[in-house]
Image (spheres, helix red, strand yellow):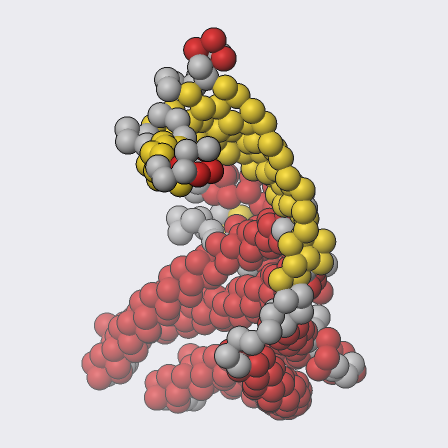
Amino acid sequence: MKKIILILLCSIGLAANAQVQTLTLKDALLYALENKADAKKSKLEIEKSEYKIQEVRSLALPQISANGGLTYNPVLQTTYIDGSNFNAPGTTIQANFGQKWTSHAGIGLDQAIFDLTVFTGLQAAKSTREFYQINNELTEEQIIERVATSYYAVYVQRERLALLDSTYANTVKVRNIVQGQYNNGIAKKIDLDRIIVRISNINAERQQVQNQIELQENALKFYMGMPMDMQFIIPQSEYEINPAILTDATNTHNRTEYLLLKKQEELLNYKKSAIKAQLYPTLSLFANYNYLGQGPQLPWFAHSSDDVYWSDYSSVGLTMRVPIFTGFGTRSRIKQADADIRLLQEDIKDTELGLDLDYKNAKAQIDNNLVIISNQKENMQLAMEITKNTNNNYLQGLASLTDLLDAQNASLEAQNNYNRAVLNYKIAEVALIKSRAELKTLIK
C-alpha cells in the first residue's frame, strides 16, 4: 500500500507541472486512507487508548513518592504541667514543646493488594482499545464509501460534458451547412436562427456542467484529503458493470456498525462492574521511611554540636477500607448503568433491522438499475441510429431541421439517461458492498 501511495504522490508532484495523471478508484481510496484527517484522527485515538491502558495499569503498580519540608516556629507552643509529676507538688511548671526549627525528608510506598475497581478498569481499558480499533475500521469504511460515490459522480459529469462537446461539434457542422444553404437562398433565416439558438443553449449547458464538474472534483479532493490544485483523469475501466456481485448474501453481525455497538455494550458492562466494585473492600500496603532534624537553628548542614539533632523513623502497615453505607448512591449508579445497557441493546436491535434494510434496498436498487441500464442502452443505441439517419436525410433534403434537432435532443437525453443509470448502479453497488461488510475489498 505504501508503494502505491508513494507512486501516487510522485504522480501528484508531476501534476504541478501541468501533467494530468490517471487516478484509479483504488489509488483514490488508498490516498484518502493515508491523508484524510478523519483517518489520521481515528489512528490517533487507537494510540491514545494504549496510553489509557498504561495509565490504568499504573494503579496496580507500587506508588512511590518522596516528601520533605522545613518549618520555623517563631513562637513555640507552651503548656503547663502539674509540678507533682516532677517532685514539686503544689506548683505549676511552664514548658515549651518543640524546637524553633524542624526539617524532615522521607520516602513512602503504597501498593494496592486488592482493589476490584483497578482490575475492572484494566479490563475496560483493553476493551476501549478494541473499541477504537473497530471505530477506526468504521471511519475507513465511511471514507471509502464517500470517496467511491464521489469518484463515480465525477466520472458521470465528465461523460456528460464529453457528450455535450460531441453534440456541440455536430451542431456546429449543421450550422455551417445551414449557413451555406441560407447564403445560397435555399434555407430560411428562421432555420439559421434556430440552429444558432441551439448552439447557444448547448454552450450554456456546457458551462453549467463544467461548473458541476469543478464542484464534484473539489468534493472528491476534499474527501481524499488531496490539494485542490491537483488534476487527474478517470479511466473508463473504473465504470464497468459487474452483475455477479448479487450472488452473495449478507451477514449483519459482520458489519462494523454492529460490532462497534456490541463493543460499546461490553464497555457499559465494565462500567457497571466498576461501580459494583465500589461495594467491595479494598486492601493496600503502605511503608515509609523519614529523617527528622530539630534544633534552635536551621537544621541543614548542622550537627549535635550545634544543638541540632537528627533522627529517623519508619512504619509499615496495611490499610483496609470496607464500605458499609453510602446513602444508596452506589445502588443508584448501578441502576443507571443497567438502564444505559438496556437502552443500548434497543439501539442494537434497531441497528440490526436498519442494516438488513440497507442490504435489501441496495440489492433492489442493483436489480432495478440493471434493468434500467439494459433498457437505456438499447434506447441510447436506437437514438444514435435515428440521429445518424436523420442527419443523412437532412443532408439529402428528406428531413427538416426540426426533425434533426429533435433527433439530436433525443440522442443526448438517451445518453445522459444511460450515464445516470450507470451512476445509480455504481452507487447501489457501493451500498451493497458496504452492506456485506466488504468495502475493504475495493482497495485490494
The mark total stands at 0
Q: Is residue 382 above or below residue 440?
A: below
**Residue at the location (29% across, 76% down)?**
201
Where, by quadrant of the figure, is residue 324 drawn? Answer: bottom right
Q: Residue 236: in sight, yes or no?
A: no
User: Which image quarter: residue 196?
Assistant: bottom left
Quadrant hosting residue 91: top left
Residue 148, image x and y in percent?
56, 67
Residue placed most toward the observer, 247 or 332 = 332
> 286 or 382: nearer the eye?
286
Q: Left or right? Give the position of 429 relative to 414.
A: right
* Residue depicted at 59% across the width and 58% down the height: 29
Q: Quadrant of the C terminus?
A: bottom right
At x 60% / y 32%, what residue is drawn?
Answer: 313
Position of residue 197 relative to residue 76, above or below, is below
Q: Position of residue 163 (x, y in %)?
A: 46, 71
**Coordinates of residue 7 in the picture (x, y in percent):** 61, 42
User: Does residue 413 sit above or below 200 in this rendering?
Assistant: below
Q: Nearer the viewer, residue 94 or 313?
A: 94
